Each structure stands twice: as structure tokens, then as C-alpha cells.
Image (spheres, rainbow, N blue to C red):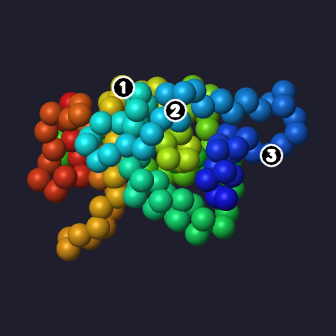
Amino acid sequence: MLAAALLSGCGDSGKKDSAKQSPTPTPTPAETRSPAVATGKAEGDLAVGLTDKAAEKVREIQASESDLGPEYCLRLRVVGGGCSGFSYDLYFDLKQDGDQHFVSHGVNIVVDELSLQYLVGTNVDYVEGLQGAGFKFGNPNVKSTCGCGSSFSV
């Protein structure tokens, strides 16, 4: 049920004034392809994607946040900083003008144009292990990472 709500949302704040709201893009066939595997490559022809496990965790987190309605998307972003020059940022946000929209395993993802150039081909997984749990980015554009793995260079 939540996945259906996510597909109908992301950028649609529920307001009836359509002159101020940009329409939510209809997923293209490339955006609705089969599930991705944790290979570091994005799902189907998507520029960015999630594994089943990551999508499940995103839905779980979004459901636990009572103030996040279906109009919120998962934002993937690259920011300057860290030992190697860039780091990832992942949070819930409303779709903005200029964002690229993707649907991966029923989760709406938005990426700004600047970040997209560093994220093309990226697949996000959720991993649990002895050293903790978290989202892991499989980014084929990365040339090196820092020792702790929280930043990268291209």
C-alpha cells in the first residue's frame, strides 16, 4: 500500500492549484524495469537505482516518519567534503524544478542535475554486518575512496 502511495506522490503536495504545481512525471518503461542486483550498476536503464533491500529499508524509514507524506521522495545528492573530495547525502525531500525523477522498486528517487553527473550508474544497497548497518553506494564512477569509506573522488 505504501509503495502505491509513493508512486502517486513525489512532488504532488496534494494542492489543487495545478498552476503552481508541476506534474509528477509518469514513469517511463526504463524507470519500471526489473529489480536491480547489488552489482554497482543501476537498475535497468536507470541512472540511479536501489536494491530490493535498500528499497525496503527506505519504505520502512519513510513509514516511521509521521510528517513525511507520499509527496516526499528519496533525494540522492553528492556534496563537496570528506577526505577524498566528495561525499553522499541521502534524505527525504520534495521534488524541485530541475530534478531528475526515477522509480526503483516502487521508491521515488530525485537527483539534482549537478549530482547526477557523479551518480550515473550508481546502485544503492542496504547492508548489515558486524561493523554496523547502513546504505552502501555502488558507484562505477568512483576512482578512489578514503580509508573509512565515507567519501570518494572521481
- For the C terminus, give its image quadrant: top left
Q: Earlier in the sequence, mark 2 or mark 1?
A: 2
Label 3 element class: loop
Q: Which residue is nearer to you in this view: 102 or 141?
A: 102
Q: Earlier in the sequence, mark 2 or mark 3?
A: 3
Q: Rounded to the nearest whole Å, what is the CA distance between mark 1 and mark 3?
A: 31 Å
Which numbered disc covers residue 117? 1
* Residue 47 is at least partly visible in this image: yes
Residue, x 11% and y 53% (percent of image)?
Answer: 147
On the rendered structure, is 52 left or right of 37? right
Q: Residues within 10 Å of mark 1 (few under 14, many from 20)?
A: few
Q: Is residue 6 above or below residue 100?
A: below
Seen as rendered, the residue at the extreme bottom is 130
Q: Residues within 10 Å of mark 2 (few under 14, many from 20)?
A: many
On the rendered structure, is 69 left or right of 138? right
For residue 41, what is the image quadrant?
top left
Residue 93 in picture, x, y percent from top left: 58, 47
Amino acid residing under circle 2: Glu
Q: Which residue is nearer to you in this view: 16 or 128?
A: 128
Residue bearing mark 3 = 14
Label 2 element class: helix
Which numbered disc covers residue 31? 2
Amino acid residing under circle 1: Gln
Mark 2 or 1, closer to the camera: 2
Amino acid residing under circle 3: Gly
